Amino acid sequence: MSRLVVVSNRLADPRRPAAGGLAVALGDTLNRTGGLWFGWSGTVVPGGAPGEGQLHERQAGRVTLATVDLAEEDFASYYQGYSNSVLWPVFHYRLDLADFRSDYVEGYRRVNRLFARKLLPLLRDDDVIWVHDYHLIPLAAELRALGCRQRIGFFLHIPVPPPLILAALPHHEWLMRSFFAYDLVGLQSQADVAHFGRYLQDESEAERLGENRFASHGRQLQVGAFPIGIDVQEFERLGRGADAVQTYEAMRQEYSRRQLLLGIDRLDYSKGIPQRVRAFRELLERYPENEHSATLIMIASPSRDDVHAYADLRQELEGLCGAINGDFGDLDWMPLRYIHRTVARKRVPGLCRVARVGLVTPLRDGMNLVAKEYVVAQDPQDPGVLVLSRFAGAAEQLKEALLVNPYDTQGMAEAIQTALRMPLPERQQRHARLMERIRQQDVHWWRRSFLGALGVQDEVLSAPPVAPRAARSHSGTR
Ligand code: ADQ
């Protein structure tokens, strides 16, 4: 039975439920194969030598966690620089926010080379390697350059923009060529697959061998859409837990005379948070019957505070939120509560369940798991309505949501009004359809489809869920 090796920028202990669905899903397979999870340790070494970093190994059950420290200069150019100030904005269609400094790309290559050097000696001949996300696009090319011959798959969690946007990226030929070191590239949506294919056709010399099969530089590459799902059972279990139930009851009591609207995001410019606030303002102006009733709760967790564009966003948002409360608020009603914090995962289902409308309105998003979590948290007898941006990857699957264009303030306000007024039978019908799809294409389906396409045997894929230990701390995978 081949062993699974997962590589991602950050690791999570797969035995801890607090780590969330992705870590638990990957943990199932890793545990089954006695696998290896490799990535950055999260430690930055001040004054450390660029391109160097200490390797740490520890066991978490049957899974080996191997991590590497990063020198301060590498962290700045690889992580804050190329990953989060170049690739993140460009792949979210935001060329205006990209900072194309040449030392960033050098640091990015250097760290990918460092990771390849540290990972290679840990590999076995029949390993299957699964690399995650934009931080690590050239990793397979660096591994191949060192002689690695194992099967390597790559999954991109963020969207792929159209070819001409990709072509604005200095070094795009190099970056896109490096995908050919993989055997399989998984993307979130059909739109992403179409953009990827069109880039290869228009901007590179790759030959199309089949619908989503390409050849270039002596290698063949399969590309496919594998929309990531959530661990529905885990989330339902969380929803029955004391914290979720208590959150739900407390909020229901406090807002008994109001209709709640909810937004939960990382504070990121891709999430369309200011646009959502403008649409909420438009709702209050156009439909005054919502005054003293509609209340928007927005929880935006701090994210990448040290990257310039994020500080600007925070300021803009604070201004917008303050203005709404100042202009519309009354002694007994504040229309908007904006909380710049991460809520504990175990409370998320309770918050979602109490909200009549879930607002998931990114300008661009690879998938957006909050949309799926909102639906799963609802009471099927009296479900709330999901208002979803058509530019989230999730919109390809969740067609029974109210799909909106987040740039269209008026259209979005109208959709929110429709959601607030939607009759019960229609809410139930839409919810049942959404649930069916979310349940069918959950995170385990996603993991099995991707690894199956990469040639991993059935015995590995049908791993039973592992009973997680009690939760302690949270650490993300990205
Ligand atoms: P993200 O952009 O980080 O991930 P998204 O899918 O929206 O995220 O959310 C990931 C998780 O974070 C969800 O489980 C959500 O509940 C949680 N979360 C978000 N904000 C929170 C808050 N304020 N408090 C508590 N929890 C919060 C990237 C891509 C997405 C893609 C995922 C997975 O950008 O498009 O869906 O990877 O592939």
Image (cartoon, helix red, strand yellow):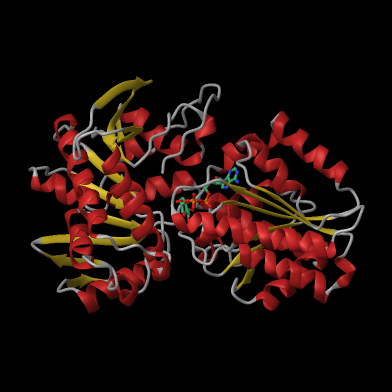
At horizontal 20% and vertical 53% (from top left) the residue drawn is: 106
Q: Quadrant of the C terminus?
A: top left
Image location of residue 352, percent across then percent down = 70, 48
Q: Is residue 385 visible?
A: no
Residue 400 screen position, x and y as percent:
64, 66
Instruction: Reply above or below: 254 against 208.
Output: above
Image point 35% across, 62% down: which residue? 99
Nearer to me, 253 or 396: 253
- Residue 450, visible in the rendered structure: yes
> Residue at image x 49%, y 65%?
364
Residue 303: x and y, percent? 51, 47
Residue in the foreground of this view, choosing between 14 and 398: 14
- Judged left or right of residue 473, residue 108 is left
In front of the other: 360 or 295: 295
Q: Residue furthest front?
A: 47
| In this rendering, position of residue 171 left or right of residue 356 | left
Q: Tell me which residue sits at (62%, 54%) in the image.
A: 435
Image position, residue 84 (x, y; %): 38, 54
Q: Is residue 124 above or below residue 385?
A: above
Q: Is 419 above or below relative to 52?
A: below
Q: Quadrant of residue 158?
A: bottom left
